[in-house]
Amino acid sequence: MAADRKKIAIDSSIAAAVIAGVAAIVAAFISRSGPSSSKPTLGTVTLQSSASGFDVRCPMTFGFTGIIQTIGGSGTISYRFDRSDGFDQPTVAGQIQTINVNGASTSRVTDELTPNIPVGDVSRTETLVVVAPTTVSSQPVSITGRCDATLPPNPPVPPPNLSPPG
């Protein structure tokens, strides 16, 4: 009986040593490899368009350029472009789009707007909204100008971020 107790004590010591060894190996592996991934951490979110004060023949496509900066992490960022026609109309949420990022990065995202009026004033406001992993919005950007059917179809030198519809 005493021999059985010694054998059980030795067996449990061996089992404890094996478990401790495996735990040490797992801990060393985790500390060397670090976490497998983390959500992107957002930096700044900005939007710009130089299409303001225009006088063009419409339809004309106006470009918006957004910048989404991350300061770390990796994964998917979901965003959208929200619009308002600027004449006391409600803001309309745009379609959700995604980009994948890894670490500190700067991602350029673009949107276009083509007013569907032959003549008249155009006033639009657009905002870049990141909806995941956290919600962050750019400052709204307004474009204003006038569509004039008497102008030539293609201006001699298109203003920046303006291009005829494709």
Image (tube, helix red, strand yellow):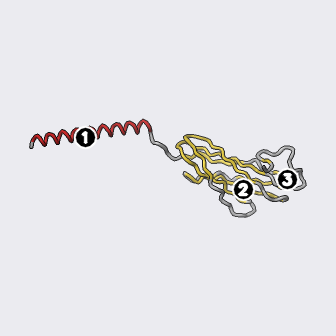
Which residue is at 39% across, 37% downward?
Answer: 29
Position of residue 85 measured from the top left corner of the image (x, y, whole percent): 74, 60
Q: Residue 130, image x and y in percent?
A: 60, 52
Q: Secondary structure at mark 2?
A: strand
Q: Is residue 103 left or right of residue 115?
A: left
The single residue placed furthest to the left in the displayed view is 1
Q: Amino acid at mark 1?
A: Ala
List x then y, in percent, for residue 41: 54, 46
In the image, farthest residue toward the right: 150
Q: Earlier in the sequence, mark 2 or mark 3?
A: 3
Q: Amino acid at mark 2?
A: Thr
Label 3 and label 1: CA atoms lie apart by: 82 Å
| Residue that badge 2 annotates | 125
Residue type for callout 3: Arg
Q: Are marks 2 and 3 in contact (CB under 8 Å)?
A: no
Question: Residue 11 at what x, y percent from top left?
Answer: 20, 40
The quarter in which the N terminus is drawn is top left
Crowd around label 3: few <14 · some 14–19 · many ≥20 (10 Å): many
Query: Which mark lies nearer to you, 3 or 1?
Result: 1
Which residue in the structure is indicated by mark 3? 57
Q: Which residue has dot 1 on it?
A: 16
Q: Is residue 75 left or right of residue 81?
A: left
Of badges 1 and 2, the one in the foreground is: 1
Q: Quadrant of residue 124?
A: bottom right
